[in-house]
Structure formats: structure tokens, C-alpha cells
Amino acid sequence: MEDATTAIAIEKLRDLQVNYTQLIKRAKKHGIEWLERDDFECLERDLGFLDRFQRNTVKRRTSYGDVFNEIKRDIGDVFYEVEEIIDAFVSKGVQKRFLWRHRKNAVNNLHVLSRQFEQISHKVNHIREEILRNRVNISSDDYAGGYEIRPPRKKNMVGFADVTNALIRRLIQETNYFDVIPVIGMFGSGKTSVVWKIFNDPNIVDKFPIRIWLTISQRFSAREIIFRILKELTTINDYDIVYSKSEVELAYLVADYLKTKKFLIVMDDVWNSHDWDRLQQALPNDNTKGKVLITSRSKEVGSYASGERPPYNLRLFKFEESWELLRLEAFEKLDCPSDLEVIGREIAKLCDGLPLAIAVIGSALLRKFSSDLYKISRTIFEIESLYASSVLTEISEMDPEDRIKKSIHLSYDILPYNAIQCFLYLWLFPKGYKIQVSKLICMWIAEGFVQPHSSHSLEETAESYLEDLINRNLVQSCNVGRVKRCWVYSIIYDLLQTEAADEIFLQEIKGRSNEGPTPSMDEIIGRRIYLNSNCLDFISSRPPTAPRVRSFVCFSSDNYVGCPENKIFGFFKLLRVLDVQQPFKFTKIDSDIYNLNHLRYLALSSVLAVLPSKFNQLWNIQTLIIDTTSPMLKVEADIWKMKQLRHFKTNASATLPELTESGKYGSELQTLGYISVESCMEELFQRASSLKNLGIRGKLGLLFEGRSGSLECLKKISLQKLKLINDAYPKPQRGEIVQFPRRDQFPSGLTSLTLSGTFLSWKHMSTLGSLEKLEVLKLKDNAFSGRIFKAVGAAFERLLLLHIEDTDLVVWKASADHFPSLKNLVLKSCERLRGIPVELAEIPSLQNLELYHCISAAESAKEISEAKKRTLPAFVLSIYPPID
């Protein structure tokens, strides 16, 4: 599936003709015959033909057999070749110094590229003729079009009320034994959804202060799972020492910690009894306060894990539950047009009570339904045609497990053109992995999957892609509201694996010794690869270059400080995405990285305090993420010459280079942080006029007083998110900041503000309360200081989330009027706080209250919870550590 490459290649061809005419003329002066204008137009026309063929046949990719599949593979290869040749020509020819100092080599290289371009032109024409000869037709009706930009839809949770109540009663029930409750059900029966609903039920949240959700799946590392539990339970100070412990040693640490605690651990998708044995060693079998819920397709696993007590066998949906869910999914309401009720009930019956099959088919039908009266008759015809088609006829004759797999394929097959690559890309992340959405979106954009939209940024368009996948029940959100992390069900992950492998779209590299030998680079056939463990072994295997690979990502928990024996960046000449942030912490930057001219997304960690000037050579870079152990980062690279740069992120305080006329770019920048106070100059924000997210780290007192940099100049940009970290040496102290900005000095469109280490007086909260659009306020590491916080002045009219962490606050006085829209209140390490204002229970919108290490405030939190539940039963209170 190389559809994104078609758009990239065509755009590069057009860009070559428009912006590099002088380069082509200069090449011809050296005797290099490049294509003439007419030849370029013919090539672009033929590439456009192949592009339309891919778009229009994306839903029929299994219809034509071997000939069709060969043509698809040829198209993918040819578009990659076009892109590579153009980039090589531009990168080698655009440097005049290279041409003159190494004239002979330069001319020879360009001669080779010229001949390759001619060959590509012939190959494109040949594929076009092959398509026409095999009568693989293109119909404009086949093209599903682009994405619809629309708000996210609330997911439907219906049915299984009796099941949910029964399981909650069993979990709350006191026992004199360690209770393990297996929930057994067939593929797609709704096990995960039911258990997830129980996991977040207010009664369960109150009962079990420690709750941990683990996705197990068919291939898993027990050691990694146990280590994850340990990280959830404790703060690991010496990461390397703890991680080096064996599986048994880690299991002992976890079991010892849990032996007296009230906890609920969910293990989703346990496949066999051997897996359960390895996981069980981390559980305190003599703790009668703890509970474990496991889900499995295997009755044998259920009986084995539950011992003398029977497992819970999940029933299928009753017909009325099936019909209710289908209506909600297909029509987004329970009302059903009378003309569609008969056909709808028949479709509900076909699903045999499998919730996932109902949800997937309902989501597919939603795309065909319209509330516009003049379209109703056509909608009825389309749904009846779908019902009468071979697809649903085939589904009706299958056993239930194959039926749901076919239903998932149905939803996958009708995905819009732009969605397929985005969906398959999710296989880049390990099964059960909670994917950071901001990271995913930057990767999609770097790969070229996100097409420009007239009224939306690439990031906004990408968010709409994700919302669409969530609405189709192919992707799950990890949170309510704006999606910050997402994941996919195991059964859908299996579909991703099959489709991505068939398309040579992506390849997983398994590095652990118990999973087989680490493959050499010769065995890599995928366009994109990810390593799940033992990255160093793979890198150190001295492989040759891998010209096909476009993305290389590591998700290992290993930590390696230094530089690999082999030069990692030399392996993959044509990378677009490189993410080695987790396993490697580089002590020097391999010079080969500067030759990755195709690179658009780069994330790495180092111990360095300087970002070398040679990073300028990454002229295609869009997202640059640099983590470092140094508190400061001197950016010698002129980021203002990186015309594609959209996101620059670092954990250090980055001092940016001075702006020069030669560095004329910056209008694409949307994220910048953290930067030093000294870098906050008016000229910077004039250049970065599209900036939406900004982080500033340093001596904020100088910024607030205008002695270094300027906060007021932020008003000239449409800033939405601002993070301010006071990094005074050796550490922030009370009284360092004597002046706080006025309301009119903050950006007028600010929706999110984070303050850290500022030691401000609580009286300044009234200034923040007057920020009209503020929705998120996070106060960390003594952002505010003082024994008493009495809310006065302007109310936080639109504030949805208030997060207060690490403060010496003792008394807090406020009413519901001060936070009228608040939904989430999070308090961390406020150990002196005697109580939370009980008046906050009167806030109608308040849904969630979380306390971490705030023991003195726990009683008032419970009082608020009891009051809220009288009007909002779904209100959630979380207290950690638990209070017996």
C-alpha cells in the first residue's frame, strides 16, 4: 500500500519543473540531457493515471487476482523510484560547491540519474499499457473521496446490564481467598468492552484505589508485563538496576508490594494456561483484598485460572440489544425510519449477537445513511443492495467467529482512500500499546498520508482521520473528550498485521532470543520496520544498506548510553521517519544522519548540550524531537533555514540561533519548546507567525519584568498552549519572581497554560481566572506558594481541567462560582492540604476528582464524591495511595 507515495512523487515532479529550472539548465550545460518540457508533461500525465488507478481500485484490491497485485506492486515501486531520483538530483545538484569542487563525480552522478529518469518514464508508460491491456477499468464512481471534517461522536455502550451488575457484585464481595475472575467469550463477543466498563465503574473505583489494566495478547513478554506493573505501583529511582533483574525477581517485588493492598488488575486477552502461570507469579495469592479479572477466548484458561470457582461465560447479545446497538451505530439514535426497519432487523439477526460485528456493520451503514429527505430513497436502495450483496450473503453462511472477521474486513474495505495507510500504520506500534496521538499525527504527516485541506491545517486534517477511524470502531480512544492516546483491539490488530504484511507495508523485527534469531538486513522486505526489543543486537549485526526502508522505529525498554558499534544512520539511506528516542542515548551524533535528505520525522536522545549546525542539511525535516540529559541545549543549527519544520521539541532550555535574512523560513512552525528566556524576542514570533504551542524554560523573572525577552510579543501570534518552567540555578526559590504579567500581556486565544517552579502568590490566580478562553490550567512544582488560597476576583469561566501538584498549600477556600465549568480536578503531592472546598460539589459539570499523595484532603474528597453521586452517579473519585 504505497498510495501516499503517489501524491508525494507527483508533487515532487511538479516542484522540480517550477523551482529547479535553473538546476536542470545547469545540468544540461554539463552535457546531461534531462527530459524536455513535453516529456515532463507526459510523465506527469501517466503518473496521474496510475495515481487515479490506485485511488479508484483501493476498495477492489482483491478482485483481479495475481495480475492486479503485480500491477499494484509495480506502481508502488515506480513511484518510489520517481521520488528517489528527483530527491537525489536536487540534493546532489543544488549544491554549487559540490558541482565545482567535485565536478567529475557530480557530472557522472547526474548522468546516471538522467538515464534512470528516462527508464522510469518508459516503465510508467509500460504499466499504463498493462492496465489497459488487462481491462482493469477506472470508474469515477469507485472513488470514495477524501475525509469529512466533523466532531467526534460519543461511543455507544449498550446491553449487558445484567452481566455488568453481576460482575461488579462479585468484585465488591468480600472473600477469604484471592479471587481471580475469568470472563470467557468468543471472538468479538464484547469481553473487553464489558470489563472496561466495569474497570471504570464508580463503585469499582471507590473499592479499589489501585487499578491496573494490562493487554496480554498472543505474543507477549511476561517480564515486560511484570515490569510495567512495577512502574505503575512505585517510583523507580535506579531504572537500570531494576530493569536488569530477572523475571522471577521482578515478580517477587510486585507480589511483595501488593500483598497487603486493595487492588484490581485486569489482564485482557490471556491465550493459554502457560501464559497465566508466568503472570500469576507476580500476584500475592494470600491477599484476600485483591482481585484479578482476566478475559480469554479459551474455556480451558478460564477453568485453570479460577480454580474451584467457575469462570464467567459471557453470553451473546439478545436480539433487542443487537437491534438497539445497530440503530445507534447506523443512525446515531434509536429512531429508525419505517422504510428501513425490516431490513435493519434482518441485518441485526445476521450478526448472531456479536457486539463487534454489529458495531462494525452499523458504522459501515452510517456512511450510507443521510437524514436529507431527498436522499432517503437512494439510501434505502443502497442498504438493500448491500444486504442482498454477496458480502452479507457470505456472512450469513459463516460460523460466528469467521463472521465477525468478515465484518471487520467489510469496514476496512470501505475505508476512504486516505484512511487505509493511516490505519495500516497503527501496526507500527506494539499490540496493546497506548499510542500518543500527537506523535502519531506527526508521523502520518511525515509519511505523506495526510492530504492538504483548504480550510484546515495538516494536523487538524489528521485529527479528523483519527476521529473517523474511531467512529468506525477500528480504533479505540483511551480517554473521554479530545483524544490524547488511542489503541486497537487485538482482533483488529491481527487484521492490521495481515494486511500490512500482504502489502509489504510494514515489518516487525523480534529481537529477544526466545522469539527466534534477530534477522539480518538482508531479510528485511518491508517499507517500514519497528523493533520491539534488543535493538542493539540488531544494529550491531553489521548489515548492508536497506534501500527499501522508509521508517525505522524502536519500542524497546532497553537503555543504551553511547554509540552503537555500527553506524545506525548509514543503514537506511531513504528514511522519512526515524525514532530511536527510547533505547539509545547518543554520546555523539553519527555524521551519516546529515545525509538523510528524505527525513521528515526525527526523534532521538543524547547527552549533548549542542545541536550541531549540520542539522541544517535535513532540509525536508518537519518534526525534530531532541531529548538530552543536559539542562541547556545550544542550537547551532539554523532552524530558520528548515523550510518544512513544523514541530521542534526538546526537554532542555534551547537557545536558538539569531535570525538572519538568509534564514527566511519559520511560518510553518506550530510547536516550539522548550526555548530559553533569552530567545523570546519579537523577531522570533514575527517569523514564527503560525505558532500554536510554545514552551519557555529559564529564569522567568527576567521575562516577566521585560529584562530579557518579552512575554507581550506573544500577543502577536495565535498561541493556544503555553508552558512556562522557571529554571533558576541551582533551583527555583520563593520570592525570585516579583512581578507577574497582567491579563492583557497573555495571548488572547490561550486555551492551555502550564506553570512550574514559579513560587507565585495565590493572589495572582485572579489574573489567570480572567483569561477568557482558558480551558486547561496545570500548576506544578510549587508554581504557587503560600498556606492559604482564597479564590477571589474573576471566575475561570471556561476552565475544564485544574491540576495542582507539589505545593505547600494548607487551606483552600472557593465556591462553585469560581470554577463554573470545571470537569476534572487533579491534586498531586499536596501533602499539607487539609481539605478541598466541599462547595465544589455544586459544580454541575464536575465529573472526576483525583488525589495522589494528598492524605489530609481525602476526607473532604469523599464528602464531595458522596454529594456528587446524588446528582451524578457516574462521578469518579480516585485516591492514591489507598486509604483503608
Image (tube, helix red, strand yellow):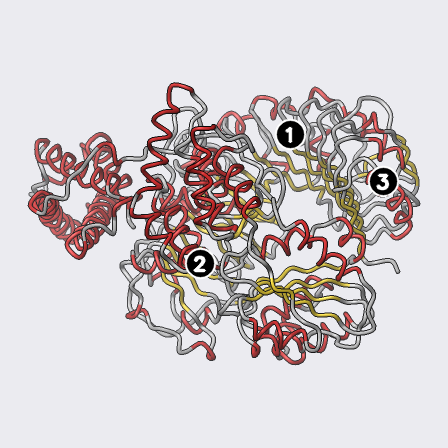
- In the image: residue 858, left or right of residue 109: right
Q: CA distance from mark 3 to mark 1?
A: 23 Å
- As shown in the figure, which amino acid type bears the numbered disc 3? Ser
Residue 792 placement, left or right of 580: right
- Mark 1 vs mark 2, CA separation in Å: 48 Å
Dot 2 corresponds to which residue?
A: 400
* Viewer-side residue, 82 vs 270: 270
How many residues crowd mark 2 within 10 Å: few (<14), some (14–19), many (20+)?
A: many
| Closer-to-camera residue (261/688) | 261
Residue 98 appears anywhere in the view: no
Q: Which residue is mark 3?
A: 785
Compare residues 103 and 22 and report the one nearer the observer.
22
Return the x and y of residue 13 as percentages of the image width and height: 21, 37
Residue 760 quadrant: top right
Task: Identify the mark nearer the N-term, 3 or 1.
Answer: 1
Instruction: Give the residue type at disc 1.
Output: Thr
The numbered disc on residue 403 is none
Give the position of the C terminus as an image quadrant: bottom right
Amino acid on which the number 2 mark rests in the picture: Pro
Question: Is residue 706 visible to us here?
Answer: yes
Disc 3 crowd, CA 10 A, few/some/many (<14, 14-19, 20+): many
Give residue 414's quadrant in the image. Answer: top left
Name the element at disc 3.
strand
Tell which residue pokes out farthest to the front in this image. Answer: 342
Give the x, y percent position of residue 507: 36, 62
Where is residue 370 shown, x and y percent of the image? 42, 27
Would you name the residue on which mark 1 appears?
751
Disc 2 element: helix
Q: Is residue 420 left or right of residue 52?
A: right
Q: Which dot, 1 or 2, sits closer to the camera?
A: 2
